Image (cartoon, grey):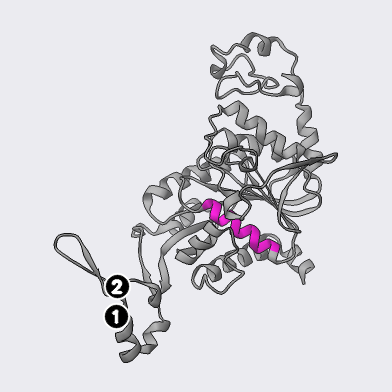
Amino acid sequence: MENGEIPENANEHCPGPQSESAGKSDACQGCPNQEVCATAPKGPDPDLVAIAERMATVKHKILVLSGKGGVGKSTFSAQLSFALAAKDFQVGLLDIDICGPSIPKMLGLEGQDIHQSNLGWSPVYVESNLGVMSIGFMLPNPDEAVIWRGPRKNGLIKQFLKDVYWGELDFLVVDAPPGTSDEHISIVQFLQATGIDGAIIVTTPQQVSLIDVRKEVSFCKKVGVPVLGVVENMSGLCQPLKDFKFLKMMENGEHTDLTEKVMEYMREKAPEMLDLIAASEVFDSSGGGAAKMCTEMGVPFLGKVPLDPQLCKAAEEGKSCFAEQKCLTSAPALKNIVEKLMTIYWSEEMSGEQ
């Protein structure tokens, strides 16, 4: 337990040996370290000083959160980082989703390794101004499950914050796991003294997702992290009509592909239709979606991003959706959200960019 580190054999919700409740809280019952923690002298965690020194060169720190998994939070984190880097900002993307690190794939960095220097751990770079750190770079096998209790996860998050040498950063984007668990408490605790700009919360439109987002908003309010805004992702399927397949369903459940026949008909009879964007509601948003929830909870609504197959493909290939003119429906929506964030919260950076 040197330097206030949480021991690996601690209970799952260990408050930490430096906490006033160390060895005394309900979470400490049955822990092999309970007596040592209860009697050890308490004091400030020296690692927080090291973290503060590292973060002194980072201007803005943004948490990207979601109440539920599978809503596109990591996709948003990746594309936000690409967008900021495209504006010539120095950007870092820190993946603290310890058990499900998808950021390396979404940035096209699978198979890369972390290198160390006398300055600390070096991020893996996509571009000279976009660096990434993730446990995904540390796994010998990408299929290997990370089966860690809370204390060990918290220890790695602390190590990322105090040992990674980012250099001068304009923005550090932190991609967190879904929910409000140990990782979230730790990142807020470790960064709070250095200043967190706030959190962007990603959701899908249906109530089953919004129920958990309300909890995420509540978490942010309780721990004192400003909510920069909520993004409604997968807000309807939108893609060019010519990219759809057209099927005729049979009574037995099988289908016949009529795509070529339909496309030929449109080319001959209604060529103007080939330039149309087709949209369909995938998730039920009859409850008002994220916009209504934001009004009710008093937090900003940043906008909607449609479910775009080309954005999904860009994420699979580790590419920016802004680089090529393929993400016709999602790229403009994401760009508008980034511009709104810059205008509301970081206008001074915008003037510096100009």
Q: Residues within 10 Å of mark 2 (few under 14, many from 20)?
A: some
Q: Is residue 216 left or right of residue 282?
A: right
Question: Vertically, is 136 above or below 269?
Answer: above
Q: Secondary structure of the magenta portion, mostly?
A: helix
Which residue sits at x=76%, y=23%?
3
From the viewer's perspective, is residue 231 above or below residue 34? below
Q: Which mark is residue 190?
A: none
Residue extending furthest bottom? 269
Location of residue 235 in the rendering, given as x and y in whole percent from the top left corner: 43, 62
Q: Amino acid at mark 2?
A: Phe
Q: Which residue is mark 2?
A: 246
Q: Residues within 10 Å of mark 1 (few under 14, many from 20)?
A: some
How many discs mark residues in the rendered view? Answer: 2
Percent across and percent down for residue 146 are: 55, 33
- Residue beneath disc 1: 262
Whether residue 308 is visible: no
* Identity of the residue furthest to the left in this view: 251
Q: Which residues are magenta?
A: 73-85
Disc 1 residue type (three-letter): Val
Q: Is residue 275 visible?
A: yes
- Judging depth in this view, the residue of 328 and 219 nearest the camera is 328
Q: Looking at the picture, how far across and down is residue 186, in whole percent? A: 63, 34
